[in-house]
Image (tube, rainbow, N blue to C red):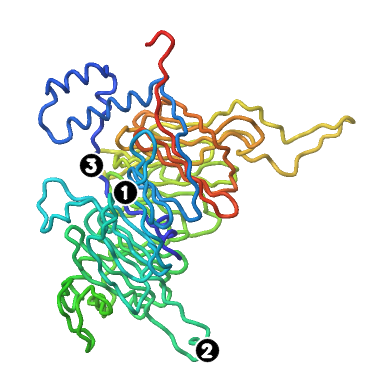
Amino acid sequence: MDNSVIKRSIKVHVTKKSNSISSLRRKNNCCILSARALGLYGNEDGSVLRKNLTILRQLVCQKSTTFDCVWTKQSNSPVVYEKGRIYFDNYRSCFCSIGPKPTLLYELPKLHKSQKIEDALLCESPLGEMLPKPSDHVPSLLALTANNWLIRMSIKTAEILEKIYLSSQWKFRYLTWDDTQETIVAKTTQNKVTAVARAAGIQHSVLLHLALFRVLPLTFVGMLAIDKNIFGNNVTDATVSHGLLIVMYSMGLVKLYSLQWIIEKFTQKQCILGQHCEWNNTTGIVGASPFGIPCNIKITDCPPVLFEVSCLKSALQIGGHPWHYIITPNERKQEGIYHIYSLKDKKLAENGIQEMQCCSLDTDWIYFHPDDSGRIMHIGPTQINVLQLSEKSEGLQRWQVFRAFTIYSAREREVESSVRVTAYGRVVKRRFSQLDDDKYETFKTVEYEDELELLTVLAVPPTDTEEKIHLDFYDNQSGNLIKSVPLREPWNVTYSHQLFFDRDTIIHVELLPPRTFCCHVYKMDQHMGEDGD
């Protein structure tokens, strides 16, 4: 199972109370600007930014505001968007999407394939905190190269600020956050036994390695191995998230372990980047080639299990207020049925079984709302249910799930009957019923714009109509439709698509045959009426 599957199947969310800007939405922009200029908003952190975002939200949602395609670029490699920057050619070139049109920030010279970037994370320096080096305050990209270098480079100039050599023995391929903007995890590919080795009776008990680093300043925490002799022969994959070591087993079993307990119990030696170290009868500099970083966390016996559950495809999600988790029972016939349990006692919440009756090429999916409100998003082809957890009876610690609101797709189209009468009066039933994709417009992507408090939903009309795809803006708290924005590109469901909405910008990335990635950028524009209002 590759890392992209892990990211989809295991999602551990830390929920916290979000700051809403809803109380200021109804104020006139002129009043907000005047009050801001007079300094009436106080000195609390982020007050001016919140007022600016309130103004921007009102401008985005005005009827006279449109989004026009201002820029298109093609690439033979995947296109990555991250906080106002569009990366092409495996992060070799970077365009800034802030402004009327994207502009080139930098373009690195062509590199050998062994130096290409395999994975990357955006790292931003904390506000109000003094760091050891001036370069630590520079917003940077943490990148993992094909030849096992972890590099930190400036997102504005691509200047390399730090380099760490990981290993000449194991192939590191993936980068993920353990704690966002605090700890990263570099993960190796799985250790596969070749046919020749298998025929010779050679078996490798180590499945993969995980290396942990604290960021800003970049510090080596330790590296550990996922050993089948410790965790069991049926281990299939592992990852780290929010201080938990998450280990997946065949047949859908998932076990969670305390990473901090493992580090304190099994760390054999503290290793500091840039200092000499003796390891396995070899002496070298930690983080320098060819020594790399040692596997200094040696797990000798299985740690205590904090939590375990069996679920379909190892798909476990944790979140909510209080903590709950979502799984699909580990049976193939249960696919598309989601159970919501209390994490404390594993009791099923009242109305905690959620199933969406739909017949579509796309299945429904569910996750905890990214606004940290504790709500749950259940998204199907033609409807979106926003679910809320609430205490059933005060003091009894029993919880129930109810719908906060539901968003439906357009359903004005006449539905063809499954029964047809011939000219001779014979009744003929259709062998196959129509899909929802054929009858209604369907939802393909749902994103949350946290700064503007908007849910953005991409709606695709039936394939045999001339209607255009459109991006709809819904209020995040009430689910009310605010605005619909048409997009000019046709949407072919057989191609891969990505859509991002960031403040005043819409980015649409589509994969065209044979393997061409096309990036379209839309920008907000205001068209004044004839009377100038």
Q: CA distance from mark 3 to mark 2?
A: 62 Å
> Which of label 3 and label 2 is nearer to you?
2
Which of the labelled discs sits on residue 199, or is there none?
A: 2
Q: Are marks 1 and 3 in contact (CB under 8 Å)?
A: no
| Location of the C terminus (image quadrant) | top left
Can you identify the residue that label 3 sits on? 395
The percent coordinates of residue 302 (x first, y second) are 29, 75
> Which of label 1 and label 3 is nearer to you?
1
Q: Are marks 3 and 2 in contact (CB under 8 Å)?
A: no
Residue located at (28% from left, 44% from top):
321
Q: Amino acid at mark 3?
A: Gly
Which of the labelled discs sits on residue 319, or is there none?
A: 1
Secondary structure beneath label 1: strand
First along the sequence among labels 1 and 2: 2
Which residue, as the protein is rendered here, is positioned at the far top? Answer: 531
Secondary structure beneath label 3: loop
